[in-house]
Amino acid sequence: MSRSKKTKPKQPPAKQYTPTNKEELAVDTIVERRKARTCGADMRLTPDGDATVLNFDHEDQDTAAALAMYEIGTADIRFFRGLLEQIASLGAPGSRRSERTSNFALGVIASIEPRDEVEAMLALQMATVHQATMVMARRLTHCETIPQQDSAERALNKLARTYTNQAETLKRYRSNGKQVVRVERVEVNEGGQAVVGDVSYRRGEDDEK
């Protein structure tokens, strides 16, 4: 007597998702942004005893290095190697090396689009301070005692202020010390005269006049 094989009921085909107009616009925007940027390859950190071998996730290492130099904003190979070593040594909590952390820092630098080595170093500092800020924020939310909470809160506030100062420093450096004041509203009495608009002032130009 033969036994009939049990067949599983066929599953209906998965319904294809149809994005909304806003979702399509968002996706198209991201695609265009990626086309407009020259994205470098991810770093690969391979342990080799006490050392770490650094290369890129790319078929040609020379091309990958050139793309990374472009993102960092330098043509100096000495500076490039030094900065990469610093990025590779960042690590993560409980780990001496972390590809994710290092590639995050490299992505932060690329997003800032440094124009020279000074901006590249400042961008790396901003990335590391942000990383430390998030670590302290997580620690603050997991505190079990008041002393732990106070310590984490102080460290978090210092890091947050440092990051703000770094962002302001980058802004001032890029503007070459030029300050622009926008006058939104001016009241003038009879017989007076007012100028409304953008007023440019460069430190040192008019101070001695």
Image (cartoon, rainbow, N blue to C red):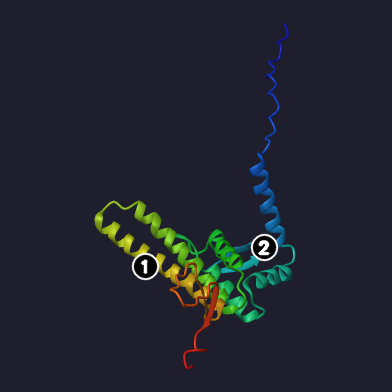
Toward the bottom, the furthest residue is 208
**Residue for badge 1:** 158
Q: Pick whichever, 166 or 197, lies toward us.
A: 197
Residue drawn at (60%, 73%) of the image: 114
**Residue 203 horizontal/vertical position (percent):** 50, 85
**Identity of the residue furthest to the top in this view:** 1
How busy is the neighbourhood of tag 1: few (under 14 within 10 Å), some, or many (20 plus)? few
Residue 9, compared with residue 19, is above or below; it is: above
Q: Alpha-carbon distance for marks 1 and 2? A: 33 Å
Residue at the (47%, 90%) spot, across then down: 207
Crowd around label 2: few <14 · some 14–19 · many ≥20 (10 Å): some
Q: Judging from the image, what secondary structure is the residue with disc 2 in? A: loop
* Residue 115, disc: none
Q: Nearer the viewer, residue 185 or 169?
A: 185
Left or right: 120 as drawn, with respect to 59:
left
Where's the N terminus, which quadrant?
A: top right
Total labels: the figure holds 2
* Residue 41, numbered label: 2
Amino acid at pointer 1: Lys
Residue sitting at x 67%, y 47%: 25
**Relative image position of residue 84 (x, y in whole percent):** 59, 72
Q: Does residue 119 sit above or below 35 in this rendering?
A: below
Displayed quadrant of residue 135 = bottom left
Can you say whether 68 is above or below 191 in the image? above
- Nearest to the observer: residue 205 or residue 132: 205
Q: Amino acid at mark 2?
A: Ala
SS assignment at label 1: helix
Which quadrant of the structure image shows residue 68? bottom right
Q: Nearer the viewer, residue 16 or 152?
A: 16
Residue 17 image offset from top left, x and y in percent: 67, 35
Would you say the residues marked 1 and 2 are in contact, meaning their CB atoms lie under 8 Å apart?
no
Q: Earlier in the sequence, mark 1 or mark 2?
A: 2
